[in-house]
Amino acid sequence: MANTTIYEEDVLIKEQGFNDHFHDHHHGDKYQTNFIFHYVFSMDHKIIARQFLITGMIWAIIGAAMSVVFRMQLGFPEESLAWIKPFLGKWIEIDPTTGMGKLVPEFYYALVTMHGTIIVFFVLTAGLSGTFSNLLIPLQLGARDMASPFLNMLSYWFFFLAGIIMFYSLFLSTGPFSGGWVAYPPLSALPQASSGSGTGMTLWIMSLTFFVVSVLLGGINYITTVLNLRTKGMTLWRMPLTIWAFFVTAILGLLSFPVLASGFFMLIFDRSLGTSFFLSEIFIEGQALDRVGGSPILFQHLFWFLGHPEVYIIILPAMGLVSEVMSVHARKPIFGYRAMVYSIMAIGFLSFIVWAHHMFMSGVNPFLSNFFVVFTLIIAVPSAVKVFNWITTLYGGNLRLNTPMLFAIGFVSMFISGGLTGIFLGNSAIDIQLHDTYFVVAHFHIVMGVAAMFGMFAGIYHWYPKMYGRFMNETLGKIHFWGTIISAYAIFWPMHYIGMAGVPRRYFSFESFDAFKHFADLNKFITIFAIISFALQLVFVINFFYSIWYGKKMKTKNPWGANSLEWTTPIEPIHGNWPGNLPVVHRWPYDYSKDEREFIPQHIPLKEGEIGDH
Amino acid sequence: MTYLIAFAIIFLLAVIVIQIGKVTELASKIRGEEEVELHNNNTQGKWAVIFMVVFLVGCIYSAYYYKNTMLGYGPLTSASEHGFELDSIFNVTLIFTGIVFVLTHILLFWYTYKYRKQRGTKAIFYAHDTKLEMIWTAIPAIVMTFLVARGLVAWNNIFPTLTDQDKFVEIEATGYQFAWDIRYAGADGKLGNKDFRLIDLAKNSLGMDWTDEHSVDDIVLGGTDKIVLPVDTTVRVRITAKDVLHNFYLPHFRVKMDAVPGLPTSFIFKPVKTTKEFRQQLSEYPEWQVPADPNDPTGPKRWETFEYELACAELCGKGHYSMRRIVEIVTRDEYNVWLASQKSFYMTNIRNTADDPYKGKKLFSFEIKAREQELKTEFAKVLSDSAITNTILLKHVFFETGSDKLSDLSKHELDNVVKIMNERASMKVELGGHTDNVGDAAMNQELSQKRASSVLNYLISNGVASAKLSARGYGQNNPVESNDTPEGRDKNRRTELKIISK
Ligand code: HEM
Ligand SMILES: [Cu+2]
Ligand SMILES: [Cu+2]
């Protein structure tokens, strides 16, 4: 784009911007004095965003590596795993006569559990929402920073602490927690029920309790910032969809995570104080426990009251990122902006009244399921609306098929494929057959796991220049995209078939059942692609770190020609984001290809007779 | 060393990856960024279309290829009545979602190709369209309503409330780490109470409460026995767990329900195909006509070894994947024969042991009946010419502790004796009392004498001529078992009837 435009825009902010006297006080900069406070205990939202991102990436690699290990066991049960023994030690059991090494079942379950917990909470909640809410909320709203930079810093460090504890639990001699990421009692409540339910579970709960604190501190900040720190002219209906998504996400987190925390506290009491919230009539290890009157199902209610909103806490930010990326690179307004916002709200609201669809077969009164079926399938409607809107955003566009755009398109494909299988599962009658089979595994990995990762990748490739002043490499990006979409489908699509054959999830081995053991070929196929896709993510990681120092430099402020405010800040990020006045907003963020202009940033004043809202 | 190699490999990989990446920069230097972008849009657009075609064809073809391995298709149609309805809702949903899946994917990737930026192309400004949005909100809403309606009707039919008037077979499955215990309700059709505090792994692994009379005829299957159920009969499974959550999962019957400690759940279903019939159905498909064991080509075929299986479908610990039981569906006649051959757990393991609350306190009507029969044969035996013994143990004669007072229960046994005595005019018998060796021998002698006389008196007062009877106390002198164990002493305290003349 022509340099003159940018120049004009700078002048605009200087002359017509909003002066909040930020730079008169220099109060912000007192935190910026030395390395420790600049990079480590930073209160700058842009640094904190990068901290969340890199920590999330480290966890993603750990979580994904775990899945490769347990997939090896599932895909190649007759192949010896003795060669991993140097890394896993006693968790690989070597048969003394044949020399055949296999994963110890306890550790298989520990890996599955840790994989789920890490990916859901550390990668897709903290890594995704933590990164982009922090980066984009102040920048896209025209704010100097978060409402409380200090709480924001704490939010990261509580997450960090949660991570340290969880990481430590991986090395316990009894192994980390192994009762599934949903941690249903009594298995999770009774140390005698499983070796991972001892110290492993204690650390798991501690870690996640700190994690809840982190989410709450972050969420309260995001909400306050969105409500109070929007720049002049930035009405709610002029906020980019990213912000809408982060905003609703934060509200969901604030309402649901405390419920999980209360469940955790009750579980802690049951574990160590002898209460019986979740325990009743248990006979274990030759002994009848003196615990009666509790209900294990109560925990499931508390867990899923968070758990279902949690899946939307994961996917909404990805949806926001995708909407923004897609609109920018299609050079077209997002189709149905208001419908998109209303769908986000509808999904957010409905996500609180569908939780028991995870519990159709749990022993809750079958009559109650009627309500949950209705609400669950209603959620499909706003979800469908969003999909149609994305597709129509492409229609008539002028698409740049670069890596962020490809990931955005891939996201839509994944969301469709995984969302549609939700319609099967949401119908309790069909769920009798599908519950706790590989069909569910296919559903949530595609709709949540892969889709959210794609949203995150779209966001990283797109905002990388904003974070590091350089671009990521496009060739590697495209290898990453095509490789990942192909292997993701190759991994998860066949799982539908295995699930429809009735094969249950969380099985260490299928050999003892005639009905489940005939899918060795598919399981091999899946494992091979799991390894390939893991290798492809390393391509991404290399690209990411290489580009921080050697990537193509960003030479103009607004390389994508985007409308939102983050692209009006200087290339070299500064504390307080804008050097002088704050930009004043005159229009919604999606004036692309309007009135013969390719894009009209939000701070450009309206022409005579032009409307700024949609 | 291993670490070193791993590190070297990763490093090498990184170098290669970075070199590949350099291609972009080179290309843009040579051709100019704009040129590269347009070229890239073309390539990526084509890739998108190729991907879409391969993906959709792959999905449809592979679904077709694996169809017959999936429940509900080909050989694996439902083995239970409600399963057919579920499969049909599944298929209807599959049709609707399949159409949406294919259409949206075609549009998504076709638009990606069609609207890629090329030289001179421009985007249109098309921000919303209320009518269009109404339509595509309404259509999913209508489809969903339809699916919900069908689903819920089926769902509520699957969970009916059975009353006592309904005829059904009741069984109970109890999950524990890592197996299932199966209990049948027995002749009364009702399962007795359980209490987890009564569990005793050696004697009463389910914690059945013997004071509940419904427990008395309950049958508990051995650890590896098949679960036998009749075809075309409603079965209600009561599902419980001892330690952690489990899930009672019968894939072929579309049955799945969590087993929750402290909160019994249930599932009602009706098997419609016997195991034999299901095998027959499988035998028509080539993939089932192969040898069951690939290493034994002459062995039985896969369809011949088919069994319905019970699995656990709720993570319950390290052995979760191994909680297998076989279910066998048989005709109703076969079922009745099988059921008759099963023994009540209480009668075989508990009755008249120290754990039996009814020992000496209660006789069940079937026991009284059976005893009447038994006593007749015992008399016939001792009265026959080839008799080896002349003594009958009067099993059901009981006294109050330490006294010679007959308990009320004894009347069944003694009334039978009265009847038989009166049938044979010439028969003379001696009633003998025996005790264990606890206490003073003289006292025992006296007690046994008194007890024998009590029996004698009862018989006389019920119409047996006194001339035919004599009573004698043997004290502790004639033990039949060792007096060292409670069980032995129990056997030694007894009343016997000896034939004096036939
Ligand atoms: C069309 C909308 C959707 C419907 C109707 C739906 C329905 C369901 C149902 C009924 C289950 C429970 C299945 C079972 O355990 O038997 C389930 C599982 C799950 N869904 Fe969805 N879903 C939808 C979309 C989503 C989205 C958007 C996400 C995440 C972004 C998601 C994430 C999950 C996860 C994580 C699980 C499995 C949790 C577990 O058991 O470990 N779903 N879904
Ligand atoms: Cu859910
Ligand atoms: Cu289990």
Image: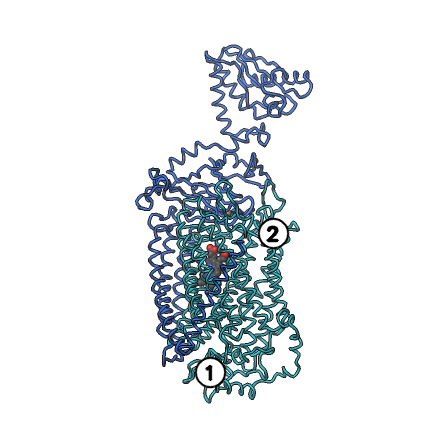
Chain colours: A cyan, B blue
| Residue B265 image label | none
- Give the number of the mark in front: 2 or 1: 2
Classed neighbour count for the residue bearing mark 2: other residues with Cα under 10 Å, few (<14), some (14–19), many (≥20): some
Q: Can I make out residue A600 in this image?
A: yes
Residue B156 at x, y = what percent? 44, 53
Residue A511 at x, y = what percent? 44, 45
Q: Is residue B13 left or right of residue A51?
A: left
Question: Residue flagged by tag 2: what amino acid is it?
Answer: Leu
Q: Kindly report the distance in space between the C-alpha atoms of the residues bearing marks 2 and 1.
A: 57 Å
Q: Chain of mark 1?
A: A
Split into 4 quadrants, where in the image is the N terminus of chain A?
bottom left
Residue A58 at x, y = what percent? 55, 62
User: Of residues B117 and B189, which is closer to you in this image?
Assistant: B117
Q: Can I make out residue A452 in this image?
A: no
Q: Chain of mark 2?
A: A
User: Of residues B119 and B114, which is closer to you in this image?
Assistant: B119
Label 1 SS:
loop
Determine whether A614 is above or below B449 in the image. Answer: below
User: Of residues A511 and B410, which is closer to you in this image?
Assistant: A511
- Splitting the image into 4 quarters, where does residue B329 fall? top left
Instruction: Give the residue pinned by disc 2.
Output: A172
Specify which label sits upstream in the sequence, 2 or 1.
2
- Which residue is pictured at 43% across the width and 75% down the height? A329
Instruction: Give the residue pinned by disc 1.
Output: A600
Question: Residue flagged by tag 1: what amino acid is it?
Answer: Ile
User: Of residues A12 and B374, which is closer to you in this image?
Assistant: A12
Label 2 SS:
loop
Classed neighbour count for the residue bearing mark 1: other residues with Cα under 10 Å, few (<14), some (14–19), many (≥20): many
Residue A557 at x, y = what percent? 51, 80
Determine whether A409 is above or below B282 in the image. Answer: below
Count of numbered badges drawn on the protein: 2
Residues tagged by mark 2 and mark 1 found on one chain of the structure: yes
